[in-house]
Amino acid sequence: MLYFIEQCLNGVQLGMLLFLLAAGLTLVFGIMDLVNLAHGSLYMLGAYFAATFAVLTGSFVFAVILALFVSLIAGMVLEVVAIRRLYQRSHLDQVLGTFGLLLFFNELVRLVWGPAGMTLALPQQMLTAVQIIPGVYYPAYRLVIMVVALAVAALLYFVVMRTRLGMLIRAGASNREMVGALGVNIKLLYTLVFGLGAALAGFAGVMQAPILTVQIGMGENILILAFVVIIIGGIGSIRGAFVASLVVGLIDTLGRAFVPDMLHRVLSTNAAATLGPALSSMSIYMLMAAILVFRPEGLFPAASR
Amino acid sequence: MTASADPSFDAGREPLLAPRTAVTVVLLAVLALVPVYAMLSGDGFALTLFTRVLILALGAVSLNLIMGYGGMVSFGHAAYLGIGGYAVGILAKEGIGSGLVQWPVAIAVSALYALVVGALSLRTRGVYFIMITLAFAQMIYYVAIGLDRYGGDDGLTIYRRSQFGGVIDLNNKTLFYYLCFALLLTSIYLVARIVNSRFGLVIQGARSNERRMRAIGFPTFRYKLVCFVIAGALCGLAGALLANLTNFISPALMHWTRSGDLIVMVVLGGLGTPFGPLIGAVAFLLLEEGLSRVTEYPDLILGPILLLVAIYVHGGIEGLLVGRRDG
């Protein structure tokens, strides 16, 4: 039971992380109608920035803040230099172009930081385990990730639903020509939205950096998970992304933790050892395929699309 | 995805020595002479490289059938390469070495997989279709990782190439090259025949306006499904060839970035054109190879090239040759 609670927490934590990635992806997708395969690269860059700044400044908190800021700038520069020229192209051209960017960034990181990965050390006080309910200890840092990501989600919700910028973002998602015709500087809005998405992705990378090794290609597999999230949630829907992130995070984590054991009870040891890991890795893709078969536009399809 | 102009309209009106015809003819002639060059210069690597180009071009031709003509953007096409490859690898490991068994099995299993995936995926549209095909490919990828008996994550070495009763010896590199070349040309011809048949016109019609095609009485779902299965079978064959070329298969063959490579080849060469996928495969793989010889960081140049093509070139290299302006 304790193990179950711990795994649930891990699932929620993965879900929150996915949400940081998926929120930016779904905004860019929903508003600019852009398939961005380079989103994972921004996640990777965020992690590298944080690791570098941690070495330079010697402070974890400074490193996180600086990395967040640089990710935002990097995203906006990328939008101005390359991405904005892709909005009017077909999805296929976008796949080609952003795939090129993905190759470019992987190689750039190899050139600048070298082929070996980096690690980002946590400050002492975050290394301890916290007793959350009697008898259940959980790493403090993972709790921090959850709280911070929840705070970011709340902030994002506030910005999108309650501010003028958010109103323009939502308006841009439902009818961009109209927003442009009403005199809104749509170019600037797009740059801001892309920068916001890049900052969120970079932030996800920063948060994950102390848990995983910072390495080339770290964004590629998680990018696919983020795509699964926004497809399940419905493209362009922040709420859908939030729900789907939690569902995907929980199913993926719990599947890895419990499916192999469950198989051991019904199958021979050999078959279970083979099938278990495969089945648990496949679980979220099966979920997505099943959802798309029954709801071809995701759980929360944006109304106007 | 609606931006691609219909290439079949301007076909036939071209002058005989249009740049694109000339380039295609020259390219085919060069490809036909690669083994001669390899024999004269003793450059065995060139022959292997170009065999690889031809095989991946076959995969791109198959992707072009559904993506270029049918508008079905499959982001999981590398799964067929893997299925075809694993069919050869698994049968070889279990002691069935005959290509007359291995290759048909590779094709049949790929077709069956395409039937299942197509039947479920073709209910969705646009980006959702892209992502659901990706999801299925990821599942197959993880299945391959789980195959402990066949190497799991590390892959599987194939000790004997497919046997053809001593009639065709695949260990003969030149022969293998020409076999791949012949299969590639046959499939380009086959795809051209398919897309210009009544069946293919229905497929192309469904790409332009599916609702209208249904309204005039075509069950487009079934047409598209059959097309999807044909493409899957063709790419499964490419997988079987690839396994025979490298003598090795691993899940990495099916990583989603490999599916991305295939899309890049098709779009780079020219979507929905008969020779576009071949031109794209040659350009992409030779560029990759050439750049990695002059610099330690080839993707630093390759990446921006792809980006520039995506932004400025309409209709890929074929589009450049014709000077077509769409979009």
Image (tube, helix red, strand yellow):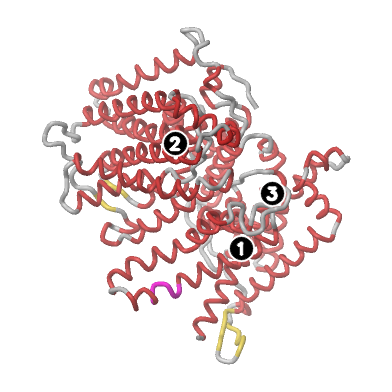
Name the residue at 22% across, 44% down. Answer: B102
Closer to the chain start, of discs 1 and 3, is 3
Task: Give the prevailing secondary structure in the magenta stretch.
Answer: helix
Tell me the SS state at disc 3. Answer: helix
Residue B316: image x %, image y %? 54, 27
Question: As shown in the figure, which amino acid type bears the numbered disc 2?
Answer: Leu
Nearer to us in this view, B114 or B307? B114
Which residue in the rendered view is the most extreme toward the left?
B166
Residue A93: image x %, image y %? 59, 35
Q: Which residues are magenta?
A: A257-261
**For residue B120, side relative to residue B37 (left or right):** right
Mark 2 highlights which residue? B63
Whether residue A55 is visible to the viewer of this picture, yes or no, is no
Instruction: Give the quarter of the image for residue A16.
Output: bottom right
Mark 1 highlights which residue? A244
Q: Residues within 10 Å of mark 1 (few under 14, many from 20)?
A: many
Identify whether A259 is placed above or below B248.
below
Nearer to us in this view, A259 or A6? A259
**Numbered tag placed on residue A30 in the rendering:** 3
Question: As shown in the figure, which amino acid type bears the numbered disc 3?
Answer: Gly
